[in-house]
């Protein structure tokens, strides 16, 4: 109970990982974390030289040490608008784009813009805990709709319809999926758009893992359906360019019908942006060059690395009787794995599993309850293959040590 209370108080994934790290005592084994989706920690994942040079050149120019405009540099906003519009059936302009400090701040902007007294918002379960935390700060009632593990984590559209009422201000989706590693098909996204249209609510499309799809389903931006339903697209440089520490994200109104282009709405967004501190000016200025000069081979190499690690994780977890990964990851950097407690002797739940695993094997895995799904585990696979294999090997030994079969043999 104490562990569960501690996890509940650390509502974010970072907080949960910090708590698990704090109980590690064994310094004989190196710590391997399959908790945080930060591939930059491993040498096999690195951003492009061109991206680093763009930032260096912008900083050394001596012209970008002042404040940027509230919504971000116009050149940056235009570059992101053009980048996103490549995959849309309509154009975007700089006026559709607001620069934020990472996708986390973009989430805050989106929920703040939708919030009003008595409002509720529909969030996926499992999902990304920052949404719950931000919604609670904005006094938004949270209503969870389930992602269906037996349908490769598709959204339960029936639940979305039954949960919504006249006070519902939006529905959030994360595609490619965090924490499930799924990628939504064109048809499923269209079904979501049609459902949102029927309910007269906008879609918050969290696409921080945009284009990081390596399975049979290609990435389709939700903004493709912007003419059907208003879409607020959230993203960042973090994942596709492997620079999470740069904290450069965006909040975009992919909304050709103009629902979010009304003067009062734009004024409200701009006023809220006045209260925020965006990314450094020189970093914003580097974005056009980063987007323009990134070679397609870099994207391809990243996808190949992620797919290789995803294959390792899928194969090795399903060789452990206590674990089951229902689908091979198709995108993003994390996946949900089912915990089979019936074969374990002295493990109460997912939280107990993760605490004991950290203490005994120096391996960090996030308990499913931290992302809304009890007795599941969240594994990150954006690590180098040797570290991933070592971590999974330790988990296999740990599971064997706590197996009912092993205990009953003695």
Image (spheres, rainbow, N blue to C red):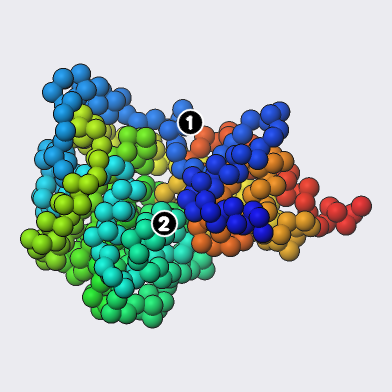
Q: Looking at the image, which residue is at 28% across and 50% down?
A: 106
| Mark 2 element type | helix
Residue 42, numbered circle: 1
Q: Nearer the viewer, mark 1 or mark 2?
A: 2
Whether residue 300 appears in this view of the structure is no
Say whether residue 35 is left or right of residue 363: left
26 in relation to 165, above or below? above
* Image location (x, y in percent) of residue 73: 14, 38
* Residue at x-position 20% and y-position 65%: 230
Q: Is residue 199 left or right of residue 157?
A: left
What kind of element bears circle 1? loop
- The mark found on residue 68 in the picture is none
Q: Is residue 283 left or right of residue 362?
A: left
Residue at the left extreme of this rendering: 263
| Residue beneath the point at 19% across and 70% down | 228
Left or right of residue 349, residue 217 in this image? left
Q: Residues within 10 Å of mark 1 (few under 14, many from 20)?
A: few
Point out the image quarter for the N terminus: bottom right
Q: Are the two marked residues, 1 and 2, in contact with CB atoms closer than 8 angstroms?
A: no
Q: Position of residue 222 (x, y in %)?
A: 27, 60
Residue 138 vs residue 31, the one in the foreground: 138
Return the disc, 1 or 2, that comes first in the chain's sequence: 1
Q: Nearer the viewer, residue 235 or 265?
A: 265
Residue visible at 62% across and 61% down? 375
Residue 253 position within the rendered picture, expressed as x and y whole percent measured from the top left: 18, 57
Q: Residues within 10 Å of mark 2 (few under 14, many from 20)?
A: some
Query: Residue 233 at what x, y percent from top left?
Result: 25, 55
* Residue 132 is at least partly visible in this image: yes
**Which residue position is annotated with label 2?**
133
Residue nearest the observer in this picture, 167 or 51: 167
Report how far apart the C-alphas of labels 1 and 2 lie in the structure.
29 Å
């Amino acid at each position: 109970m104490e562990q569960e209370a501690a996890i509940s108080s650390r509502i974010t994934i970072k907080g949960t990982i910090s708590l698990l790290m704090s109980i590690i005592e064994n310094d004989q084994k190196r710590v391997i974390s399959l908790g945080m989706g930060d591939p930059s920690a491993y040498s096999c994942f690195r951003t492009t030289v061109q991206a680093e040079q763009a930032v260096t050149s912008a900083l050394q120019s001596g012209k970008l040490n002042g404040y940027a405009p509230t919504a971000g540099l116009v050149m940056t906003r235009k570059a992101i608008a053009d980048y996103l519009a490549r995959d849309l059936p309509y154009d975007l302009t700089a006026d559709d784009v607001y620069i934020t400090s990472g996708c986390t701040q973009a989430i805050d902007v989106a929920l703040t813009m939708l919030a009003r007294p008595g409002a509720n918002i529909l969030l996926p379960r499992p999902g990304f805990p920052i949404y719950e935390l931000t919604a609670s700060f904005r006094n938004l009632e949270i209503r969870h709709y389930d992602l269906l593990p037996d349908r490769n984590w598709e959204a339960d559209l029936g639940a979305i319809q039954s949960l919504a009422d006249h006070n519902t201000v939006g529905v959030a989706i994360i595609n490619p999926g965090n924490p499930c590693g799924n990628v939504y098909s064109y048809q499923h996204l269209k079904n979501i758009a049609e459902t949102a249209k029927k309910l007269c609510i906008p879609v918050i499309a969290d696409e921080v893992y945009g284009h990081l799809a390596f399975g049979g389903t290609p990435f389709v931006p939700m903004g493709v359906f912007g003419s059907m339903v208003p879409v607020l697209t959230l993203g960042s440089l973090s994942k596709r360019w492997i620079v999470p520490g740069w904290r450069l994200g965006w909040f975009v109104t992919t909304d050709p019908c103009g629902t979010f282009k009304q003067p009062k709405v734009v004024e409200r967004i701009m006023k809220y942006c006045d209260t925020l501190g965006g990314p450094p000016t020189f970093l914003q200025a580097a974005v056009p060059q980063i987007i323009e000069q990134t070679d397609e081979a870099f994207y391809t190499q990243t996808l190949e690395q992620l797919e290789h690690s995803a294959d390792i994780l899928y194969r090795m977890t399903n060789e452990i009787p206590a674990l089951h990964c229902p689908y091979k990851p198709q995108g993003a950097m994390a996946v949900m794995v089912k915990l089979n407690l019936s074969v374990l002797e002295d493990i109460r739940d997912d939280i107990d599993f993760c605490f004991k695993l950290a203490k005994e094997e120096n391996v960090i895995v996030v308990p499913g309850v931290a992302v809304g799904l009890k007795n599941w585990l969240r594994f990150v696979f954006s690590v180098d293959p040797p570290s991933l294999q070592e971590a999974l090997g330790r988990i296999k030994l740990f599971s064997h040590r706590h197996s009912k079969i092993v205990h009953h043999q003695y």
